[in-house]
């Protein structure tokens, strides 16, 4: 579901040139879902090979990452491990969303409304264990390090940023900020233009800095976590009934301490449906002490034969593969020269 604090968080545009030479820990699930939902045919169906295997994720990972590597970035993809039990509420909510989207998609299909078919199909994207394994194999062959997190991928990526193993976390979600990442880069893997109802909108990379958030909102790290819990996290997706971003910020600044903050909204929490109530201490602890591990950065060597094998088996044309490999070689050569320099 993601954390909804976009309206109150300060951000600034950052050109790809300013990320040159930087190591970015990418939230793999977040980005691969992005590819699965956006790389589709006009009728909403994902890219597939002749045997019906979905290939949208492979296409996105191959071509978009090559573009980023050509800009001089070094990428580490962090994959989710075991999710905390508290996240089951989010999984249930996502299933409900998918069921409703499927009904609307089927109706649009019956009526031949391709525009609506594309709109609702985006919500039907599903990342399977097979896709995860394929993604890891392709990324490793491209010279991109893959890290298997013991718990939440965003928590692991944030830990790597906090311990200066990487420069920033790359994700569309804001959760990494509650896990303490000093920097979050958004729109990293999106194409430069995104199609909207009004035409095409230019997409620019943005950086959100943890210290700037705290200074701008006049909060400390504990208060930022409390704010997140009030508006809703993956562990309590409904948040607190009737409390939006600005109201949450006001409550946190007035009450200051976690115990006082949640005492002030306890009646609201208890008035919610039983399945939406939560124990704030449990969620607070998950952000404070996430399940993470120590990671060293070691980029694998590019394996062009493996790349060719993976993509050829999924019906990618030789011409497109060769073009991508040429760009990949050029990007890796440029990275070597940067290192020597």
Image (cartoon, rainbow, N blue to C red):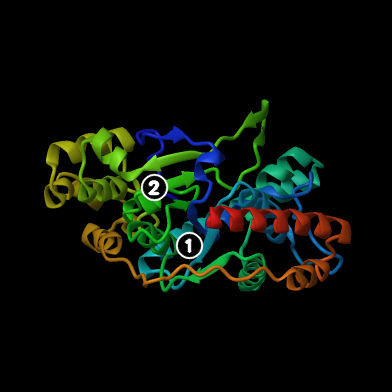
Q: Secondary structure at mark 2?
A: strand
Crowd band around label 2 with a 10 angstrom C-alpha radius: few (<14), some (14–19), many (20+): many
Left of 80 or right of it: where is 9?
left
Report the residue at 39% width, 47% height from top: 183
Above or below, comparing residue 165 to residue 218 in the picture: below
Q: Looking at the picture, how far across and down is residue 217, in whole percent? A: 25, 35
Report the label total: 2
Left of 79 or right of it: where is 89?
left
The answer to whether the residue labelled 2 contacts the one labelled 1, judged by CB atoms less than 8 Å apart, is no
The reply to whether residue 290 is in sight is: yes
Q: Nearer the viewer, residue 275 or 224?
A: 224
Q: Which mark is residue 183?
A: 2
Residue extending furthest toward the top: 198
Report the residue at 23% width, 49% height from top: 221
Report the residue at 39% width, 52% height from top: 175
Q: Secondary structure at mark 1?
A: helix
Disc on the earlier residue, 2 or 1: 1
Q: Looking at the picture, how far across and down is residue 227, in whole percent? A: 27, 45
Left of 264 or right of it: where is 271?
right
Residue extending furthest toward the front: 341
Report the residue at 70% width, 71% height from top: 303
The reply to whether residue 271 is in sight is: no
Q: Looking at the picture, how far across and down is residue 63, in whole percent? A: 71, 53
- Residue underneath mark 1: 91
Q: Nearer the viewer, residue 330 or 115?
A: 330
Q: Which mark is residue 191?
A: none
User: Spatial distance from mark 2 to mark 1, Cα to Cα?
Assistant: 27 Å
Labels 2, 1: front one: 2
Q: Looking at the picture, how far across and down is residue 143, in whole percent? A: 62, 66
Query: Residue 322 falls in which quadrant of the image?
Result: bottom right
């Amino acid at each position: 579901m993601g954390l909804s604090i976009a309206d109150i968080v300060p951000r600034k545009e950052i050109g790809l040139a300013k990320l040159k030479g930087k190591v970015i820990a990418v939230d793999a699930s977040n980005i691969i879902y992005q590819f699965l939902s956006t790389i589709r045919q006009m009728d909403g169906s994902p890219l597939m090979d002749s045997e019906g295997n979905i290939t949208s994720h492979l296409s996105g990972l191959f071509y978009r990452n090559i573009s980023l590597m050509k800009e001089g970035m070094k990428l580490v993809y962090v994959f989710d491990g075991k999710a905390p039990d508290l996240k089951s509420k989010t999984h249930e909510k996502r299933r409900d969303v998918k069921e409703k989207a499927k009904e609307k998609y089927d109706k649009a299909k019956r009526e031949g409304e391709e525009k609506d078919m594309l709109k609702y199909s985006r919500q039907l994207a599903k990342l399977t264990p097979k896709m995860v394994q394929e993604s890891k194999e392709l990324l490793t062959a491209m010279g991109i390090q893959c890290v298997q997190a013991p718990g939440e991928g965003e928590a692991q990526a944030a830990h790597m940023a906090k311990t200066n193993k990487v420069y920033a976390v790359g994700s569309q979600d804001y959760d990494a900020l509650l896990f303490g990442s000093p920097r979050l880069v958004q729109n990293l893997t999106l194409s430069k233009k995104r199609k909207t109802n009004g035409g095409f909108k230019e997409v620019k990379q943005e950086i959100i800095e943890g210290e700037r958030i705290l200074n701008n909102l006049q909060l400390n790290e504990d208060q930022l976590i409390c704010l997140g819990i009030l508006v809703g996290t993956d562990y309590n997706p409904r948040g607190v009934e009737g409390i939006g971003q600005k109201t949450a910020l006001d409550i946190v600044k007035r009450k200051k301490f976690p115990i006082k903050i949640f005492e002030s909204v306890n009646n609201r929490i208890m008035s919610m449906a039983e399945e939406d109530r939560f124990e704030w201490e449990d969620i607070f602890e998950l952000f404070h002490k996430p399940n993470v591990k120590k990671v060293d950065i070691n980029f694998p060597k590019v394996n062009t034969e493996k790349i060719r094998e993976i993509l050829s088996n999924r019906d990618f044309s030789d011409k497109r593969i060769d073009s991508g490999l040429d760009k990949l070689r050029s990007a890796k050569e440029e990275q070597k020269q940067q290192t020597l320099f």
